Amino acid sequence: MADITNQSLNEIIENVKTKKISSRELTKAYIKNIENAKKLNAFVTTTFDQALENAKQFDNKPNFDQLLPGIPLAVKDLFCTENTKTTAGSNILNNFIPSYESTVTKNLWGNGSFLLGKLNCDEFAMGSSNETSHYGNVINPVGDQLVPGGSSGGSSSALAADLTPATIGTDTGGSIRQPASFTGTVGLKPTYGLCSRWGIVAFASSLDQAGPMTKTIKDCAIMLESMSGFDEKDSTSINKKKEQYSKNLKDNIKGLKIGIPKEYRVDNMPKEIDELWEKGKNILKDLGAQLIDISLPHTKYALPTYYIVAPAEASSNLARYDGVRYGYRSKQGKDLIEMYEKTRSEGFGDEVKRRILIGTYVLSSGYYDAYYLKAQKVRQLIKKDFDDSFKKIDAILTPSTPSSAFKIGEKTNDPVSMYLNDIFTVPVNLAGLPALSLPAGVDKKGYPLGLQLIGKALDEQKILNIGYAFEKNCGFKNEIKKWWS
Ligand code: GLN
């Protein structure tokens, strides 16, 4: 059969189910693509032999009733995978082989899929460009000089380059939605607690959430359905009935009320982003939705609040990397304290060190009230803005990012300009809400741009439905030339 790796996950599943392609043929086709795409540096580890073995087992005893029958999938290297190295993009975990499987990956495998490899990411998911990874930066298939976004940059790059039919990332402040926007793909950050955090290398535990990255909305619904669900191993996991997001997908959005927050029109925002937003509003209006101007007055505090809360939690979560139980250990150091110091200073990269310093500072006695406690209070106000608005609307439409993909190296010497890239994505994490980034158009240079749909807590189905209707009417096609192979 002709190469089908450029098809959507849903189409590929149909091809497997109708036996037009076997799982083994499919797996071989992805392996070939991955081998031809080394320049993108999207993978930290590949598990080809195991994948071929899994595919063979599937073909010998196929179960076509599963959601992901015989589908090979690569995942972000932040998900612990049993007996397969998991680095979190860090030198400090360069030899870490987990003895357990994260719940979300286990759920994916339980639905018929298997691992193809582990995808590069910013170190401990801290970054917006995949340039903080110890394993080198990842290239955006859209252009050889461009970052793929971050921190799930290996995931967005691999997906857009047809190296995996779908993938998963994590989103603490935008790490699924921003790379999706930069590569013309779909990314969903689910409601906090919908997908288990168990077995995911922790960054900021009150914000971290795993979610799907896909080529289409239907694929996104299939992946979310496969990976989500209650998990008693995660105390923040929500105990609710499992939804059938893909079966319940509807493209009728007549009468839905879509909020347009005035605070998302920021100073110096490129005209193209504004125009894209207008285009999105018009599409939804033409489909029968009603646009309603809303105000989320505390939006301007979201970024500073995030850059206090996230480093505070990170500094605490990363205290466990001391070279004793697992991971990298420095050979230097005369005594225990010096071994800790050298391990951490050699094991962590600059951005991670910066976060640990900031986090330790904002939590230290004397500064705790002024920074951390204050940030927690502001976080509640940000959440309240959303709660108040959602009394009168169904969803919110905003741009996903204030720019298209930027050049490698362009922002590495200016952390604040890097952090500013998260301006539209972080409020959602602080409020624990679901948000979808949809490919919506391209800028003058032809680089993809995304729009964001924010929903009420646990209203994933509604934002997927709006996205589904939008996708059918937006006319966006991700035209990527395979310059790397
Ligand atoms: N870019 C943001 C940061 O560096 C968000 C990262 C993420 O969502 N993991 O903190």
Image: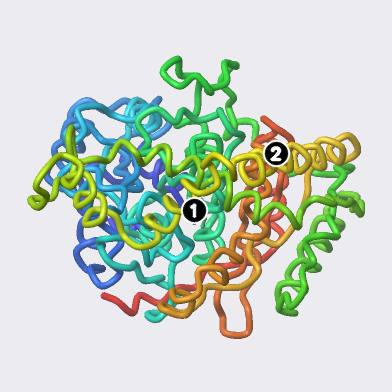
- Indicate yes or no: mark 1 CB to ligand 1 under 8 Å: no
Q: Residues within 10 Å of mark 1 (few under 14, many from 20)?
A: many
Q: Amino acid at mark 2?
A: Lys
- In this view, the residue farthest toward the bottom is 445
Q: x, y (%) of residue 126?
A: 43, 54
Q: Amino acid at mark 1?
A: Ile
Residue 32 seen from this side:
yes
Q: x, y (%) of residue 160?
A: 42, 62
Q: x, y (%) of residue 44?
A: 23, 55
Residue 417's image quarter? bottom right
SS of the residue at dot 2?
Answer: loop
The structure residue drawn at horizontal position 34% and vertical position 39%, both measured from the top left corner, is: 319
The structure residue drawn at horizontal position 20% and vertical position 49%, both measured from the top left corner, is: 343
How many numbered discs, if any?
2
Near-viewer residue (329 or 265):
329
Mark 2 sits on what residue? Answer: 250
User: Is 241 placed left or right of 63 in the picture?
Assistant: right
Q: x, y (%) of residue 263?
A: 82, 60
SS of the residue at dot 1?
Answer: helix
Mark 1 sits on what residue? Answer: 358
Q: CA distance from mark 2 to mark 1?
A: 45 Å
Near-viewer residue (287 or 87):
87
- Indicate yes or no: mark 2 CB to ligand 1 under 8 Å: no
Near-viewer residue (119 or 126):
126
Mark 2 and mark 1 residues within 8 Å of each other at the beta carbon: no
Quarter containing the N terminus: bottom left
User: Is 422 placed left or right of 13 in the picture?
Assistant: right
Residue 376's image quarter? top right
Q: Residues within 10 Å of mark 2 (few under 14, many from 20)?
A: some
Q: How is the image coloured?
A: rainbow
